[in-house]
Image: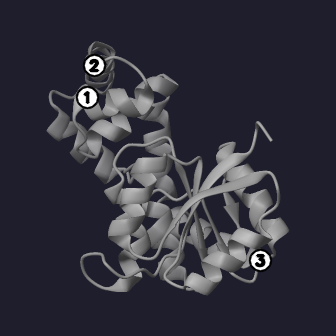
Amino acid sequence: MADRLRVVIVDDHSIFRSGLRTDLDASVEVVGDAADVPSAIAVIVQTAPDVVLLDVHLPGGEGDDAAGGEAVIRGTGPTTTRFLALSVSDAAADVVRVIRAGARGYITKGSSGREVSAAVHAVAEGDAVFSPRLAGFVLDAFGAVAGETATATDELDRLSSREQEVMRLIARGYAYKEVAAALFISIKTVETHVSSVLRKLQLSSRHELTAWASERRLL
């Protein structure tokens, strides 16, 4: 199938990886898998999948295993790959942590292969997907800063969609060449966008931009 989505499965249980590979429908092609943080980062960088199905508890990261999924997302750098957490955990802390790191959704391992396949397609298309009970955790966590979010939204409205993409990557500390590679644009175009972002937000440096984005929970 020409339009099959390319997926990497990251989970420290080989039986689960094998079972999930079998259960996913024919519209999804598994191009790699991994059992820990370092190998996950390596296979994601090598294969550049559309979506990564990611357990949130993984060995091999800095600190405890609970932050393993977050470490994988942050360790792959700027990328067009989208991340979908797939975990046995339904703890609010796990959900919020991995979403803040950049995952586009979070579903539990009780989901069927058909449900996971549908979630993969939804995330690949830019939608956010959550198991019903978990959506409330995200709403509660991000609703707590609703006032700040409203202010940030007003300020973000000054930027084009491309400028917002560049802004987030630069604010996270990525070099111009990394941003250019992630967004498939030239370094010169990145420089132009950064200058425009700083002018529109009335900031003078990328360090101020990082602080601005961090204060508004945009990272």
Q: Mark 1 or 3 closer to N-term?
A: 3
Image point 55% across, 86% down: which residue? 91
Q: How is the image coloured?
A: one colour
Q: Which residue is mark 3?
A: 111
Residue 88 percent location from the top left of the image:
61, 86
Q: Secondary structure at mark 2?
A: helix
| Mark 2 and mark 1 residues within 8 Å of each other at the beta carbon | yes
Residue 77 percent location from the top left of the image:
34, 48
Residue 137 placement, left or right of 154: right
Could you classify mark 2 by the number of other residues whose Cα lies within 10 Å: few (under 14), some (14-19), or many (20 or more)? some
Q: Secondary structure at mark 3?
A: loop
Q: CA distance from mark 1 to mark 3?
A: 39 Å
Q: Is residue 2 above or below residue 188?
A: below
Q: Which image quadrant for residue 156?
A: top left
Q: Which mark is residue 187?
A: 2
Q: Which image quadrant for residue 113?
A: bottom right
The quadrant of the rendering that contains the N terminus is top right
Residue 147 placement, left or right of 178: right
Image point 59% across, 53% down: which residue? 51
Residue 149 percent location from the top left of the image:
48, 50
Q: Label 1 amino acid?
A: Lys
Q: Is residue 82 above or below residue 67?
A: above
Q: Secondary structure at mark 1?
A: helix
Q: Which residue is mark 1?
A: 177
| Mark 2 and mark 3 residues within 8 Å of each other at the beta carbon | no
* Residue 55 in view here: yes
